[in-house]
Image (cartoon, rainbow, N blue to C red):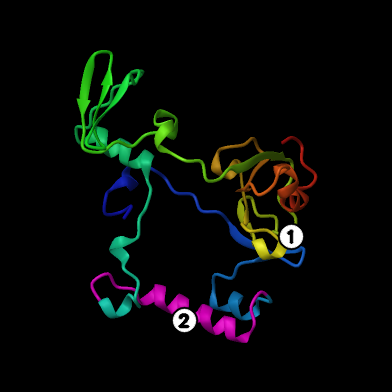
């Protein structure tokens, strides 16, 4: 999708050095090669066979060969690339009206038909907006906690990776949702040399959200500031 829409002309990619998963109080590298998969203690023999089948599926996937899809409909899988598409929109004649107040969202027969601003109307068939613009038409169904931590060291047991992502599965910490950790550093041009930025996030499930991300904070210690 990224290549087809040529969004890649406007964005650069920087991969993380490794992906890890939390199990029984420790973090383990997610295998991404055949050799790593065979040596990993994350999976049993049968799981390793399933993992091998998945890698082969990815390797042999062909958009024009339905047999290679294995019951997956690739054209119905959605992707969200707002900033890249915003730049493409501007390039191909999209109109931007910045610092314009939204006076009214115009509706006809239950559907949006336009937005009124300073006496003028911008007509539309579809409106994408922040929920705060339509408080009477949205319902809060959840909340997220996000903690940004500044470190002076890479995360322990990641082989000194300058960037990585860690997933703490919900079953490992008796939760309903997973906890995610993403760490980046100077290699991504987002921190000074010798500093690391780790972001923890998860869905709030209690009245004390900070206690919920404690397992992730323990992986990052010591933390300079959060």
Residue 45 belongs to the span the image colors magenta: yes
| Range covered by the magenta-colored residues | 42-65
Q: Nearer the viewer, residue 108 or 99?
A: 108
Q: Position of 81 compared to 52: left or right?
A: left
Would residue 79 be counted in the magenta stretch?
no
Q: Earlier in the sequence, mark 1 or mark 2?
A: 2
| Pointer 1 residue | 157
Residue 165: image tag: none
Residue matched to label 2:
53
**Dot 1: element:** loop
* Secondary structure found at label 2: helix
Q: Position of residue 50 (x, y in %)?
A: 52, 81
Whole-percent x, y for residue 179 in the image: 64, 54
Counting from the top left corner in percent of width and height, residue 16 is at: 55, 54
Q: Quadrant of residue 68?
A: bottom left
Q: Say which of 173 and 17 sits in front.
A: 173
């Amino acid at each position: 999708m990224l290549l087809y829409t040529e969004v890649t002309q406007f964005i650069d990619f920087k991969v993380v050095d490794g992906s890890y998963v939390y199990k029984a109080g420790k973090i383990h590298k997610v295998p991404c090669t055949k050799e790593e998969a065979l040596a990993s203690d994350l999976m049993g023999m049968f799981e390793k066979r399933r993992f091998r089948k998945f890698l082969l599926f990815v390797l042999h996937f062909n958009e024009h060969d339905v047999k290679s899809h294995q019951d997956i409909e690739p054209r119905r899988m959605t992707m969200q690339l707002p900033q890249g598409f915003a730049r493409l929109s501007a390039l191909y004649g999209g109109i931007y009206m910045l610092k314009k107040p939204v006076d009214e969202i115009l509706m006809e027969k239950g559907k949006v038909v336009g937005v009124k601003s300073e006496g003028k109307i911008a007509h539309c068939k579809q409106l994408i907006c922040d929920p705060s613009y339509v408080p009477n038409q949205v319902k809060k169904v959840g909340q997220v906690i996000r903690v940004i931590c500044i470190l002076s060291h890479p995360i322990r047991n990641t082989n000194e990776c300058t960037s990585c992502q860690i997933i703490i599965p919900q079953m490992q910490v008796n939760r309903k949702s997973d906890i995610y950790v993403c760490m980046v550093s100077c290699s991504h041009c987002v921190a000074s040399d010798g500093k690391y930025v780790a972001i923890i996030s998860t869905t709030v499930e209690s009245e004390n959200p900070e206690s919920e991300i404690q397992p992730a904070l323990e992986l990052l210690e010591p933390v300079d500031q959060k």
